[in-house]
Amino acid sequence: MFITPAYAQAAGAGDTNSMLMSLLPFALIFVIMYFLILRPQQKKVKDHADLVKNIRRGDTVVTTGGLVGKVTKVVDDDQIEFEIADGVRVRQMRSMVSGVRAKGEPAKESKDSAKETAKDDAASK
């Protein structure tokens, strides 16, 4: 009885500012997610790729399964072989290494390659 429908009133024209203001929270959430989640994860992936790429013979590594061993051989770009106990060698994918505990000494040069390096140095002078 006292309630009158307001069907005759025309809706106001849509304001572009109000549309942009309604999208602003979504954009703000995306920016916050990028800096708090995505960017640190990308850095972590890059650091792990560098760690895996720089595994050398003699390094003590920890796998994602928890095995700790000393790298005895780098088989190829994807696999390493490491010793977890005396005489027990295991092949593992490089990507499954979670960390390097101790860096081993780099492989020593053989006498022939050392002589060639010395000859190259003398020739360049």
Image (tube, rainbow, N blue to C red):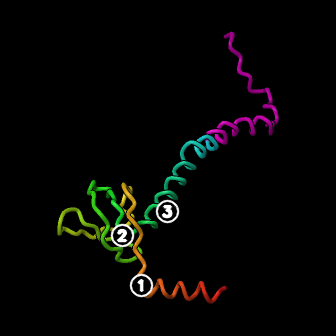
Helix, strand, or loop for circle 1? helix
Magenta-colored stretch includes residue 23: yes
What kind of residue is marked 1? Lys
Q: Give the CA distance from mark 3 to mark 2.
A: 16 Å
On screen, residue 84 above or below 72: above
Q: Nearer the viewer, mark 1 or mark 3?
A: 1
Give the number of the disc on residue 111: 1
Q: Amino acid at mark 3?
A: Asp
* Residue 82 coordinates in the image, percent (x, y): 28, 67
Which contiguous range is marked in magenta? 1-29
Going 29% across and 63% down the picture, which residue do you hit?
70
* Residue 96: in magenta span: no
Q: Residues within 10 Å of mark 2 (few under 14, many from 20)?
A: some
Viewer-proximal residue among 31 and 103: 103
Which residue position is annotated with label 3?
50
Mark 3 or 2 closer to N-term?
Answer: 3
